[in-house]
Image: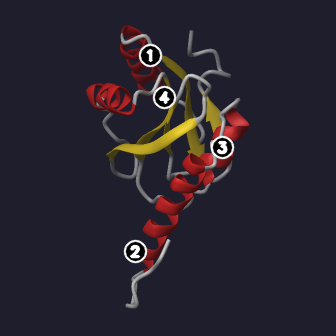
């Protein structure tokens, strides 16, 4: 990544670091085998969010990372999930699997009923196009909570 010869704000630099981190993992054929891999991947991208953000890692049939995309930005305690947008990205990217994720800027690792319901809704939509939702993870300053490991995915 080449930077222009100008001054940058902290926000611009953080954005560039996030973008380059996502590009690095895509270029180097990072394979997602489980929650630990996704935690390492997302930690570089979502390390300092101060509002809730829903995003997804799009994967090929071997679970290699194609790319990371933000689905929606929210506020401190919630963010709407647009299932249609996830499906559109999957088709556009020719992704066969995804890992959905969102952060809890408050630091709470608790999973809400809304988290469980949207996970089921996304899983149904992804399966309708013959894809797979591998996991839905919640990131906090303390680490990652996997809805799959908690039994909320088929």
Query: Crowding at label 3, few (<14), some or many (≥20) Cα neighbours within 10 Å?
Result: many
The CA distance from mark 3 to mark 4 is 20 Å
Q: Of the two numbered discs 2 and 3 on the same chain, state the one appearing first in sequence.
A: 2
Query: Which mark is drawn over residue 123?
Result: 1
The CA distance from mark 4 to mark 1 is 17 Å
- Give left or right: position of 71 versus 133: left
Q: Is residue 108 visible?
A: no
Residue 51 locus on image (x, y percent) = 41, 54
Residue drawn at 40 percent across, 23 percent down = 118
Query: Which mark is drawn over residue 39?
Result: 3
Contact (Cβ within 8 Å) of mark 2 with mark 3: no
Residue drawn at 62 percent across, 21 percent down = 148
The CA distance from mark 4 to mark 2 is 33 Å
Contact (Cβ within 8 Å) of mark 3 with mark 1: no
Residue drawn at 68 percent across, 50 percent down = 142
Residue under pointer 4: 112
Residue drawn at 70 percent across, 39 percent down = 37
Query: Which mark is drawn over residue 12?
Result: 2
Secondary structure type for disc 4: loop
Residue 144 locus on image (x, y percent) = 65, 40
Q: Is residue 66 visible?
A: yes
Contact (Cβ within 8 Å) of mark 2 with mark 1: no
Residue 8 locus on image (x, y percent) = 40, 84
Q: Of the two numbered discs 2 and 1 on the same chain, state the one appearing first in sequence.
A: 2
The CA distance from mark 2 to mark 3 is 24 Å
């Amino acid at each position: 990544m080449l930077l222009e010869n100008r001054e940058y704000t902290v926000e611009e630099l953080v954005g560039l670091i996030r973008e380059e981190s996502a590009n690095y993992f895509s270029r180097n054929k990072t394979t997602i085998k489980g929650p630990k891999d996704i935690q390492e991947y997302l930690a570089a991208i979502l390390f300092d969010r101060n509002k809730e953000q829903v995003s997804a890692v799009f994967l090929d049939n071997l679970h290699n990372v194609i790319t990371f995309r933000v689905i929606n930005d929210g506020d401190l305690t919630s963010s709407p999930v647009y299932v249609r947008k996830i499906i559109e990205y999957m088709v556009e990217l020719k992704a066969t699997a995804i890992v959905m994720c969102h952060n809890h800027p408050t630091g709470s690792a608790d999973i809400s009923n809304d988290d469980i319901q949207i996970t089921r809704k996304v899983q149904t939509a992804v399966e309708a196009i013959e894809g797979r939702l591998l996991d839905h993870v919640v990131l906090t300053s303390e680490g990652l909570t996997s809805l799959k490991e908690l039994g909320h995915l088929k």
